[in-house]
């Protein structure tokens, strides 16, 4: 059995969507067992069936807009997030899934799960849907505002293993997010990364990728520092949201247009779901001794279920162990 | 008469679209006179009427994928781009419009038009359509990969004047592109910019803006360094393009869906045009002694006409003089 700890209280619609997502996961994935950390009474309101589900009482929630993430964890050791994170080390849970505040989760995972041996930095890596039902990993989506090329290389190793094992991509390519495709474009950091990645035998380095190809990229892993990749992630989100609004404005023009909109209703709904970050599942925190998945704050049950499925896949495929082997052999 | 120099040979569809765009501008804007720089024979193929239009023979074109932009200008002094740029100083043209290679145009403008007194850096500033038929200025979309807060402040002054005079926004707000809205988010640069902008009486500083609001922003000017803002611009472009493809994939599902798509055809086309960067007009190069507008490389005649209209507006409103007054009084 794969044992997964669930932070049932983190997220905009917690615990309802988290509990229902957990229930979906139990129904659909036979080899998992879940422990829900949170307010027992609240959790039981939404729980239909307790088979393969344990509940552990937690007290307090890490606020979604906590300004000092490290303090948030230290002062809320009995919170659902902190207890779920601790359980990986203390109770032998194989993974933890949370929709709670990103920075607190990253800081908490760092403190309570700990870094993988040899790994210099953690990173957060969402998987983003691309044209033609593709997928790409975006790195580092916000853990390190400033970072060195060697650390980015370790993260690229992680993403390469992840893409092979979880996304079933036989030979994942890594692209550097940059302002132009030619060599030498961008900042000093980007030029250093280019040189380092090109000379590494384990990385299939594509070179620079301009974000005007971000949803149809020539590589399955797109990497930059945590500031830039976070900006890319949020710009994708903002553009999708803004375009959705403009699309609605335009599509409802005229009588034929309104009829067309009506007939397109189901297709538009599916399109919206396809682009909705809350439905995509979770972002994995790279660089830990264990598996931690950050589900979107706005996750509904389906999205949260996807994050649990993702966690179980990562455990089943032994990703941590495989990355660890790469990192250690790169070190020597 | 406002005199505008046109680089007729720069752009993916030059000179056809540039010449036709110029013709549109003459028909619609009564107080302008245009000089077209380029191959006379080629230009005349597309020119219907030469009233208020002069042609000056140029030789050679600056390539769209020139790697060394400064060399591109120095070695092509008789090119349409270089001649058009030079004409601002040498022939008293009030403005120049080009769809040519961005970096070459910025470098060329620097050399051949020269920087405004007191202005430390140039910048490139596209105007991007937002939700509810709004507009926002994005800065610096790619002129300076690394930059100091004082230089960003000068650019914000420029954008503030531009927003008032050209976009008719009475009190334009300036937002800093950042990974979070709270103070203290982001890199050292961002914190320094925050402190500097907050204490400047001429800037209505909104604080941080997350790009998840990029198409519905709480400020009319969004600023960052030239690397980051260029990444934002290209991510908007890439997301719009990718979403367009996915939308087509989804909308054509099923028989009712296909019918809906058919009925929505005109509205979708308008939506596409609304999001098409080539239709939006031009990006102004900030920080020069004169007016230089970069039209999109893929401009069609309508988009190029928009860039000419924009240039004439900037001249008519005396933007350069007004910015110059601000910059000089800030210096003392």
Image (spheres, coloured by chain):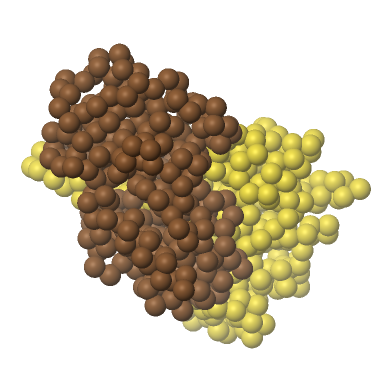
Chain colours: A yellow, B brown
List x then y, in percent, for residue B104.
49, 36
Q: Residue at x 28, y 38 (%)?
A: B4
Residue B29 appears left or right of B277: left
Using the rendered view, name the quadrant where residue B146 is placed: bottom right
Compare residues B175 and A98 and report the one nearer the observer. Answer: B175
Residue A324 appears left or right of A256: right
List x then y, in percent, for residue A173.
65, 35
Classify B290 as above or below A98: above
Residue A314 appears left or right of B31: right
Using the rendered view, name the quadrant where residue A113 is placed: bottom right
Q: Residue at x 55, y 78 (%)?
A: A67
Compare residues B71 and B308 and report the one nearer the observer. Answer: B71
Q: Residue at x 50, y 48 (%)?
A: B143
- View extreme (left): residue: A255
Q: Residue at x 16, y 20 (%)?
A: B48
List x then y, in percent, for residue A129.
48, 44
The answer to whether residue A228 of the structure is visible from this angle is yes
List x then y, in percent, for residue B308.
26, 40
């Amino acid at each position: 059995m794969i044992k997964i700890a669930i932070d049932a209280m983190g997220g905009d619609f917690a615990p309802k969507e988290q509990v229902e997502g957990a229930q979906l996961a139990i129904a659909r994935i036979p080899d998992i067992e879940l422990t829900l950390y949170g307010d027992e009474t609240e959790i039981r309101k939404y729980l239909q069936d307790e088979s393969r589900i344990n509940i552990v009482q937690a007290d307090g929630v890490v606020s979604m807009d906590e300004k000092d993430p490290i303090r948030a964890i230290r002062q809320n050791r009995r919170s659902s997030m902190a207890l779920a994170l601790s359980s990986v080390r203390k109770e032998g849970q194989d993974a933890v899934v949370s929709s709670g505040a990103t920075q607190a989760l990253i800081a908490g995972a760092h403190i309570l799960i700990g870094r993988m041996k040899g790994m210099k930095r953690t990173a957060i890596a969402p998987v983003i849907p691309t044209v033609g039902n593709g997928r790409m990993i975006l790195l580092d989506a916000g853990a390190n505002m400033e970072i060195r090329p060697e650390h980015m290389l370790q993260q690229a190793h992680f993403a390469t293993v992840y893409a092979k094992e979880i996304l079933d991509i036989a030979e994942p390519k890594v692209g550097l997010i940059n302002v132009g495709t030619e060599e030498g474009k961008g900042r000093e950091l980007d030029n250093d990364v280019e040189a380092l990645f090109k000379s590494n035998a384990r990385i299939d380095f594509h070179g620079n990728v301009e974000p005007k190809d971000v949803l149809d990229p020539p590589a399955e892993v797109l990497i930059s520092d945590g500031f830039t990749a976070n900006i890319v992630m949020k710009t994708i989100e903002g553009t999708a949201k803004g375009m959705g609004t403009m699309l609605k404005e335009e599509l409802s023009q005229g009588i034929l247009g309104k009829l067309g909109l009506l007939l397109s209703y189901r297709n538009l709904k599916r399109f919206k779901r396809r682009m909705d970050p809350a439905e995509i599942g979770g972002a994995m925190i790279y660089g830990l001794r264990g598996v931690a998945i950050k589900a979107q704050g706005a996750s509904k049950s389906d999205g949260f279920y996807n994050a649990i499925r993702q966690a179980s896949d990562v455990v089943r495929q032994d990703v941590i162990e495989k990355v660890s082997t790469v990192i250690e052999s790169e070190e020597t």
